[in-house]
Amino acid sequence: MTPPMTSAGASAGRLFSPLQVGNVTLRNRIVSPPHGTYFAEDGLVSRRQLDYYETLARGGVAMIVTGSWAVWPRTMPNALTNRATDPRAVAGHTRLAEAVHAHGSILVAQLHESGRQGNTAAHRGPLLAPSPLPDPVVREVPKEMERSEIDDLVDHYVRSAEALRAAGWDGVEILAAQGYGPAQFLSPQMNHRTDEYGGSPAGRSRLLRTILACIRASVGPDWLVGVRMNGSDCVEGGAGPEQAVVLAETLAGSGHVDYLSISGASNEAYPLWIADMSHAPGLFVDLAARVRASVSLPILVATRITSPEQAEQILTAGAADMVGMVRALIADPGLPLKAQRGASTEIRPCIGANQGCIGRVLSGASMRCTVNPRVGEPRLPQRSIQARRVVVVGAGPAGLEAAVTAAEVGHRVTLLERAPHIGGQIALAARVPSRAEFGRILTFLEAELARTGVEVRLDRPAEVSAVRDLAPDEVILATGSRPIRTGFSTAFPGRDVLPGHDQDHVLPAVDVFSRPEAVGRRVVVLDDDPHGHATTVAELLAPDHDVTLVCRSISAGQWSGPANQIALYSRLQRAGVRILAATWASAVGDAEVLCHPTHAPQDVFAVPADTVLLATGNCVVDDLYPALRNELPDVAVRRVGDCLAPRLLDQAFWDGHQAALAIGREP
């Protein structure tokens, strides 16, 4: 774990010193590590991929390691991932190498085989693994690999490396971490073989060593070959830090490897290598330091390295030679150059929300970013802007993004906010320790308002007269949403209201921030909420209250998605929150809530409660919209964020960004 982040500049330290790795020289120590973008088209490099990786290179990153380049068809979960060896892929691979090299970055492909952590939807055959043990997330029993299948897999790794070398790439990285493919052979918990590919550390590493030896024999000594490996499997029965050091020494001694990239965990601790904002920064830094102390190879470390200052601390402490900043570079691909010129306050920060990046990928969609709506979008052609007078009403995330973007492209922007501060709902959420990084994006946006010249007027209620007096050419409404206070749930649409919802001790969940004195000791939170209000207030209150979370769904916090839900559950349980899943309320009494299983409404039981908090969704606050349309018929009025429809944070940023780009066009 890294020390706490400071505001010290990184531009003059080790972060921007060159580094020799194998036969290439990195211009600095910042790496974009592998991550699945789902930008491919039919498994081939797309225009969107070219734009994405070229933007990273233009922003100053030293090395890009592309993620999920499938070594054989079995690895392909769908057509949105890339094929390494398909002859049709050659032209795209060549164009990608040329685009990245044009901006001075090194390009490496991570060669990927999923093993039991794969997906059989595309090829319909069985998953292949060292032993027939199902993955805890995928939950499909794999076929134990036979010797011929192992030989075939090794051959595909070699062919993949040869294809990328021929296309002008600088190297490959073998994914042998996070429970994928070769990592399953390395793990005593996953590999129960008794032949030459199991049994002992040497046997379990045989597949990886064979892949590396065969690739090196094919590509020669001067082409870059790296390995991503675990510093620890982070699971009982898996390989720990001591075994990681032994493996690192073995790989370094082979002469086939130019660098090691240190990660950790597997699906048993999923997805720790994509840890959300509730986790401490630099989860695997200490593990990387142990490996670095044992070998002379350059060491890369990644996961929750979110700022240049933190990266500099890691390098200065001698924990690693390179820093992988996946999500930080997604949030702002210009991070390296901004940090190098001392403009860290202009870096759009990653907040570890995991909604737009891994959250979308896990849903089968292509990657985006919660706080950077430009990711994955085509580069817009430069066009002349006729500056317009724009009024943005509401300084939540949608309004802030709209105001900053509109000002950046040349419009004159005034931002009105009824509260004495900016931020809307995320300003409240940032007060919960595990959600504190919401504050980082607000700090950035506040600085951007000043940098781009937005006129900010706080304590200004949203009134027609206030907008009219500014004589706008266009108006963007970001007036948000308000809690639904009736207790209505779509699980029981025949109940228009929850009996007892209008009692004094029944409050909207968000009221705990403004009225903490109104919350009694025994709290019941009713969770039918797509936004995270219920779990957020439950976590906030748990240290000083007896909290019961009643969830109509089969689990709490489904808003968080598979990338965050396990961590959320762990925090709630550690805090002592009692979770009643697949349960709902039939009535609120004076000192209790009558509940029942969602599938058995007749089985009613009582849960004691001094305070009942409703987290049953929000409704739009758009009263100003028809009034402005009537009062200012010649002025374009656009709604964004929750004012348009209450949704998640990434959609608020997207709405605000798109509305700003649409200024001057028909609404």
Image: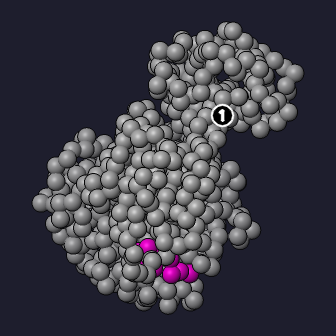
Three-letter amino acid code of the residue under disc 1: Ile
382, 419: nearer the viewer = 419
In the displayed structure, 469 sits above or below 532; it is: below
263 with respect to 548 (left or right): left
Q: Is residue 629 above or below residue 58?
A: above
- Is residue 509 visible in the rendered image? The answer is yes
Residue 261 appears in view: no
The image position of residue 123, as x and y in percent, is 71, 71
Residue 318 within the segment the image draws in magenta: no
Residue for badge 1: 484
Q: Which of the pair 518/62 is nearer the observer?
A: 518
Q: Is residue 51 magenta?
A: yes
Horizontal side of residue 65 vs 589, given as left or right: left
Q: Secondary structure at mark 1?
A: loop
Q: Which residues are magenta?
A: 44-53
**Above or below for 100 versus 315:** below
